[in-house]
Amino acid sequence: MTAPKPGFSQLRLEGVTRRFGSQNALSDLDLTIEAGEFIALLGPSGCGKSTALNCLAGLLPLTGGSIWQDERRIDVLPPERRGFGMVFQSYALFPHMSVRANVAFGLRMRRLPKQEIRRRTDEAIRLVRLEEHVDKLPGQLSGGQQQRVAIARAVVLEPSLVLMDEPLSNLDAKLRLEMRTEIRRLHQSLGLTTVYVTHDQEEALSLADRLVVLRAGAVQQIGSPQELHTRPANWHVADFMGYRNLWPMRVQAAQAGEITVEADGLRLVGDPVGQIAAGDQVVAAVRPEDVRVDDPHATTNTVPAEIEVVEYQGRELAAEARNDAGLRVHVRTDKRIAPGDRVTLSIDPRRLLVFPSDSVERPAAGLADAAEPGTLREPRLVP
């Protein structure tokens, strides 16, 4: 199968907006996609990522903005005239058709010559490694095999753009890993341009050239996997990218490249992200794997704590500890620890990111009144 012709050098979304009544599901999305890129739209349920994909596919009309392939405006075109392939979460296979018939369906609708249909269908089936299953019905296939059929049906059309809406969410963990590799292999070998929707940050990091993190319909950050992993733009992105430790604190001192924050007598030094001044309320964030346990060389950001919960995760343990003031700390470590152990936790100041705090949730109903800023009594952040 020859690599699909890109059909464009750039795809531009300019101020793309979609409202449902008075509710903004997607607000002013600006994004330029280069031909051959793999873009992941990432975020929690309801953030607008599937809405963005459906607007791009033509399944939802725009409320505002426009979509361009180079100098050709396409948001005014019906879905079938955009030339995109789509892979759905539910596979959407015809249950009464064989694998071969499902893959060939779109080509038949285009009334291509029979010989061309057979050649391209055979090649697409070979690419997804289903040669031994061509005559089976979807019901006779595993979930991973059905997803391969759906992908083959999309790429056999040699589309200028492939859209994937959480295609792996119905698969078990082992199949998800296998299919991630297959999707990336196909993207690279065919030179596809791909837009991929997922709520799984690990999946997005492993697949995408660039990530677009959405929250409440608005873009929070666009960047490479490395940029988002190591330098989230705000605490919302950090929360979604695996910074499980998110602590409301108050700035005691701020200087270039270093900031000192405090809550309930705990004082930490971290790396500021954004404009922060002394006295500001902030959110300090660190990944569990960046919290060290009983490091004899640690002299800064040390936190005496007690291990409360331990989960076995192969070579590492995931643990939750609590200090004397009630601060919960999530930890990943290869050290052998057990509930009840007294340990000293430490954090490299370069790994503790400090973000401006735009909102901190009050304690749930039935608890004490909201704690004063700079305290750590059961803090929880607004998602």
Image: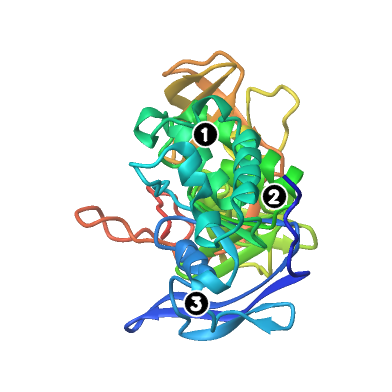
The residue to which callout 1 is attached is 176
Q: Badge 2, how many Cα within 10 Å: few under 14, some, many 20+?
A: many
Marks 3 and 2, how far apart in space? 33 Å
Residue 259, above or below 295: below
Identify the residue at image location x=77%, y=63%. Answer: 255
- Measured as percent of width and height from the top left, residue 162 is found at 60, 57
Q: Amino acid at mark 2?
A: Pro
Badge 3 element: loop
Q: Residue 268 in the image: x percent, y percent? A: 63, 47
Alpha carbons under labels 2 and 1: distance apart: 19 Å
Tell me how many marks there are: 3
Label 2 SS = helix
Residue 310, quarter of the rendered image: top left
Q: Nearer the viewer, residue 356 or 367?
A: 356
Res 212 → quadrant: bottom right
The residue located at (28%, 60%) in the rendering is 369
Mark 3 is surrounded, within 10 Å at the Cα level, by few (under 14), some (14 to 19) or many (20 or more) other residues, namely: some
Q: Which residue is mark 2?
A: 225
Which of discs 2 and 1 lies nearer the camera? The answer is 1
The mark nearer the N terminus, 3 or 1, is 3
Mark 1: which secondary structure? helix
Instruction: Residue lying at the far top in this picture: please name it.
Output: 336
The amino acid type found where label 1 is placed reads Arg
Q: Nearer the viewer, residue 311 or 352?
A: 311
Q: Is residue 255 above or below residue 313?
A: below
Residue 188 percent across, percent down from the top left: 74, 45
Observer able to see residue 62? yes
The mark closer to the camera, 3 or 1, is: 3
Residue at the bottom extreme? 64
Return the residue at label 3. 78
Q: Quadrant of the N terminus?
A: top right
For mark 1, does the 10 Å Cα neighbourhood hold few (<14), some (14 to 19), or many (20 or more) residues? some
